[in-house]
Image: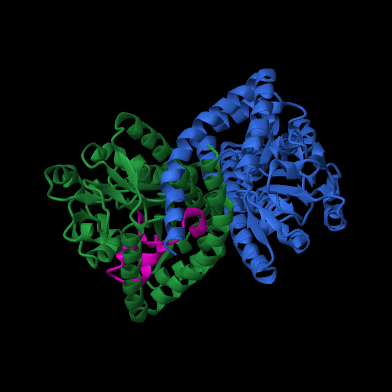
Chain colours: A blue, B green
Amino acid sequence: MKLLRNLFVIIFLFAVFVPFGNAEEKRVRWKLAMTWGPTLHPFVDTVENMADMVETMSGGNFVIRIDASNIHKSPFGVFDMVKLGQYEMGHTASYYWKGKDMSFLPLTTMPFGMTTPEQYAWFYYGGGMELMQKAYEKNGMLSFPGGNTGNQMGGWFRKEINSLDDLKGLKMRIPGFAGQVLAKLGVTVTNIPPGELYTSLERGTIDALEWVGPGMDINMGFHKIAPYYYTGWHEPATELQFLVNKKAYDKLPEKYKEILKVAMKTAAYDMYIQNYHMSANAWSTMKEKYPNIKVKTFPDEVLNAMKTSYNELLSKYKKENALFKEIMESKEAYLKKARDWTYISDYLYLKSMSDTE
Amino acid sequence: MKLLRNLFVIIFLFAVFVPFGNAEEKRVRWKLAMTWGPTLHPFVDTVENMADMVETMSGGNFVIRIDASNIHKSPFGVFDMVKLGQYEMGHTASYYWKGKDMSFLPLTTMPFGMTTPEQYAWFYYGGGMELMQKAYEKNGMLSFPGGNTGNQMGGWFRKEINSLDDLKGLKMRIPGFAGQVLAKLGVTVTNIPPGELYTSLERGTIDALEWVGPGMDINMGFHKIAPYYYTGWHEPATELQFLVNKKAYDKLPEKYKEILKVAMKTAAYDMYIQNYHMSANAWSTMKEKYPNIKVKTFPDEVLNAMKTSYNELLSKYKKENALFKEIMESKEAYLKKARDWTYISDYLYLKSMSDTE
């Protein structure tokens, strides 16, 4: 009788606890660090959408806590925090890490480069994902597209740019690689914290700045004080980035890996579409309220000089970094084919629609 | 003692059997009917990717069997089969159902309408999904974007079209609404099964035809016998469709609903990108092997006449069908805003890149 009772106790304990230990029902709690503050739309929406999809698709078992930069206090420490496993995930942009390795730069966007659908085609069908993993695997991380801003505008200028001479001595806030390109043309490139940009532009501390596009520019108010809105050249398809710690990822059950990958991919595509919507709405509002805004394209002389400056920097970095060279050559070859198609499809369609209005 | 043993038995039975009856582990087997045959890429890839994602994300518990048209023998019966619950899902295109209700037509694409990112922005952020559900809920179904072909080309022509007169008596295979638009301009619109198109074009039974774009056109071989490749006007963003039987959907556990919705959305976005890639590659190959191909845009006179013809048909259908009118007015208002943004972003970027080559 005692034996029977002990047997029941063993079966009871087994039956009660085993289901909770089942890999199918594994409970996972992750943390994600964003480079952004908690109100930077649509970037933060992308992360929240991703986490919501993961939670719902896993039946509430895989939950990702999101820490904005006001919590972790280290917007540009996201790379290292994910690498070291302090956070399982990050949401950021690959080009912030070019100081660590130049091959991280072209995984975001490049001047004179691909548009968003062209670049997604490169990532998913043209070898881009494999090259991106090659760049990140050395750091114990996986990297995935994290949302695209679409084509970024060339920036807000207080005065019109009619020639190369107008660039000489121009004080402009334009960070990163595009800033290097312009610096070679005589632009005084400055970096000013976002909170001080409006006042700097208003007081003439700077003559111009670039931000993103109408959807994210409208709340900054630059259109009220710098009426020349230049079309884009430097960030035609800025792709943000999800970083994932590889050890943490490898421990996930297969179905959670797939849930995570699909949620990141969907959230990234969605951001491209959300920002399209935000920019369409914001641009419509801006034009109506501020009819003084003038959309301008840089003169061919200026664009050609920018291209020359860009190509010089490109040659230099290709010589210095083999993986950078490999990624750029892959992007350049893909751009050529993809652009020929874009030209006869969307471009000539848009042109004929505009010509016959 | 007996009481204690009975208690153990009850706890034992409860603990063993409850986890297996848990809704979290529900096994679901669905069937999906495609309008297409089993080899029509990238359409079939989209469905397979969707089903693969659902299966993996559900840990193998939610499995969707795919029947191509060679199995169910009813390519244009997909609507009714899903409505009646013979299949839980379908993969097809909404504009095939315009004979049942004109309001199904504009949920695919419209002549002179939105490009793919513009239309996705309308679906997901501009009220499009709500209008689509309004059209389908009367039929006991849910409808979701099912993959976009991107901008379709205007077709392959044996002779150049220089004026409206060149359209008179022209024999062209161009089905659906675009065919109606051209018929008003004197085109003799014919419908010929896909398998007979090449021979018909070669023998002059028809003078022109439209298919999709380079990625799907290349295997049809039309470029070998009709060298004028016209740019698009009639299907700028053809969105395929997933149909889901509402009763079947309502029975799914919440997490499977989300898994299904996210998988459909991702697969649809992916098809847009996959077809971009296929077209970029195919166009590159075609141009190289057949340097005689001439890309043409219809003259403004012809495009303007097409627009007039289109607007006349539009007015007629708006008067006849209130939901068609509501959907079209929503699309027209959205297009205006979205196109202004497309124009100053991607369009002027592409123009300046082309001008300074």
Q: Is residue B28 left or right of residue A239?
A: left
For the question of whether residue B39 can be seen, the reply is no
Residue located at (64% from left, 57% from top): A295
User: Considering only vertical position in the picture, is A186 above or below B149?
Assistant: above
B277 or A341, which is in the foreground? A341
Tell me if residue B109 is in the magenta stretch: yes
B347 or B283, which is in the foreground? B347
Q: Is residue B172 left or right of residue B284?
A: left
Residue located at (62% from left, 23% from top): A325
Q: For residue A17, which quarter of the picture? A: top right
A341 or B20, which is in the foreground? A341
Tell me if residue A111 is in the magenta stretch: no
User: Considering only vertical position in the picture, is A285 above or below A250?
Assistant: below
State the count of labels: 0
| Segment tinted magenta in the rendering | B91-119
List x then y, in percent, for residue A84: 78, 31
List x then y, in percent, for residue A51: 66, 50
For the question of whether residue B25 can be seen, the reply is yes
A108 or A111, which is in the foreground? A111
Q: Is residue B3 left or right of residue B56?
A: right
List x then y, in percent, for residue B343: 54, 56
List x then y, in percent, for residue B220: 25, 40
Residue located at (46% from left, 73% from top): B329
User: Considering only vertical position in the picture, is A228 above or below A303?
Assistant: below
Residue located at (66% from left, 60% from top): A294
